[in-house]
Amino acid sequence: MTTKKDLRLRVSPKLYDELMTWSAEELRSMNGLVEYLLTEAVKKRRKSFKGDIDDEKDE
């Protein structure tokens, strides 16, 4: 079973409002949206990354 790590993130009120609006438009939770955006950013940064970050298992 995969467990997720907690991450405390502080953002400006303006960014928070933008993320809330975006997540509502995408019918996602804010957490789901932020996790998706971070996953995509890591994939883009590591173009040679093999596999899907979402599929990794904690050991």
Image: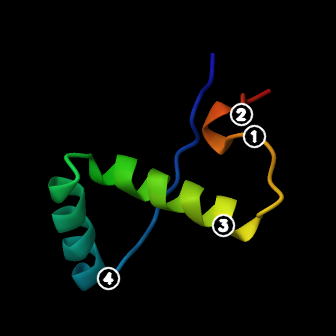
| Between discs 2 and 1, the one toward the N terminus | 1
Disc 2 + disc 1, Cβ < 8 Å: yes
Left or right side of 29 for 6: right
Instruction: State the CA–CA distance, disc 3 to disc 4.
Output: 25 Å
Q: Earlier in the sequence, mark 1 or mark 3?
A: 3
Q: From mark 1 to mark 3, how far is it between C-alphas? A: 13 Å
- Residue type for callout 1: Gly
Q: Which residue is mark 3?
A: 44
Rate crowding at label 4 as few (under 14), some (14 to 19) or many (20 or more) other CA atoms within 10 Å: few
Do the residues under discs 3 and 4 have CB atoms within 8 angstroms? no
Identify which residue, 26 or 6, lies in the foreground. 26
Disc 3 crowd, CA 10 A, few/some/many (<14, 14-19, 20+)? few
- In the image, taking residue 16 as reference, residue 36 lies left or right, namely right
- Identify the image quadrant of the C terminus: top right
Q: CA distance from mark 2 to mark 3?
A: 17 Å
Which amino acid, mark 2?
Answer: Glu
Among the two numbered marks 2 and 4 on one chain, the one whose residue lies closer to the N terminus:
4
SS for dot 2: loop
Which residue position holds label 4?
12
Q: Amino acid at mark 4?
A: Ser
In this figure, which colouring scheme has been used for the structure? rainbow
Residue ID for mark 2 = 56
Q: In front of the other: label 2 or label 4?
A: 2
Q: Which residue lies most toward the top here?
A: 1
